[in-house]
């Protein structure tokens, strides 16, 4: 069993005084020392629902059985699990749709950027072929002079 109280991360001497406490229970824990016997009994029940060792667990078991035997034959617990699974599937499907949409948008943006770059390179190549000075090409296209030289070399246009 692990018990937590809310404290300020920046100044641990400041405690949130809302009387809230979070308790994490581990049904497979090694030591039960210092833990209430009803809690230990409940943890044993979690691991094996035939282990009913206290009145507290008897009440829990009775309620679980009631929930599992409602009028239409489907237990409310099972309906909750089904509903939870459906919501999870719905969330996953929505995530996939959003992911695809984001991927398409990113792909379009990358494609546009590539298209602009290809068009710019073609423009630079044509300007070089018309014997325009590399400095003029760099200034006109707003491309660094070294990049213009690199494009000229790669296309064997530099004299």
Image (cartoon, rainbow, N blue to C red):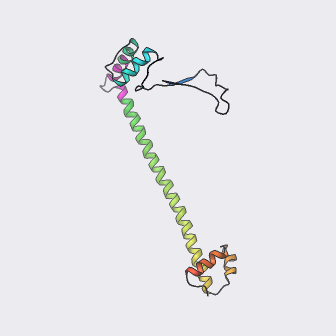
For the record, the magenta segment spans 62-78
User: How many tags in the picture?
Assistant: 0
Q: Position of residue 49 (x, y in %)?
A: 33, 22
Residue 67: in magenta span = yes
Q: Residue at x 36, y 21 (%)?
A: 45
* Rendering quarter of residue 30: top left
Q: Position of residue 37 (x, y in %)?
A: 43, 14
- Residue furthest out toward the top: 55
Residue 54 versus residue 22 in the image, above or below: above
Judging depth in this view, the residue of 43 and 132 nearest the camera is: 43
Q: As rendered, which of 79 and 159 lies closer to the eye?
A: 159
| Residue 32 position in % (x across, y down) | 44, 20
Q: Quadrant of residue 121?
A: bottom right
Left or right: where does residue 36 sit relative to residue 118?
left
Query: Relative to 91, is 61 on the left or the right?
Result: left
Q: Determine if the magenta segment contains residue 92.
A: no
Question: Residue at horizontal 65%, vertical 30%?
Answer: 8
For the C terminus, which image quadrant?
Answer: bottom right
- Which quadrant would residue 28 be assigned to in this image? top left
Q: Position of residue 41 (x, y in %)?
A: 39, 17
**From this viewpoint, which residue is outermost toward the left?**
73
């Amino acid at each position: 069993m692990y018990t937590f109280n809310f404290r300020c991360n920046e100044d641990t001497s400041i405690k949130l005084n809302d009387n809230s406490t979070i308790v994490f229970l581990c049904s497979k824990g090694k030591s039960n020392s210092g833990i209430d016997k009803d809690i230990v009994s409940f943890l044993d029940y979690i691991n094996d629902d035939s282990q009913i060792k206290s009145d507290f667990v008897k009440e829990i078991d009775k309620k679980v059985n009631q929930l599992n035997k409602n009028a239409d034959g489907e237990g409310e617990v099972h309906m909750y699990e089904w509903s939870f699974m459906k919501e999870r599937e719905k969330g996953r499907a929505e995530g996939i749709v959003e992911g695809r949409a984001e991927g398409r948008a990113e792909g379009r943006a990358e494609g546009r950027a590539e298209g602009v770059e290809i068009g710019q390179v073609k423009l630079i190549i044509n300007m070089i072929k018309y014997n325009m000075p590399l400095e003029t090409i760099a200034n006109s296209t707003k491309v660094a002079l070294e990049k213009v030289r690199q494009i000229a070399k790669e296309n064997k246009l530099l004299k």
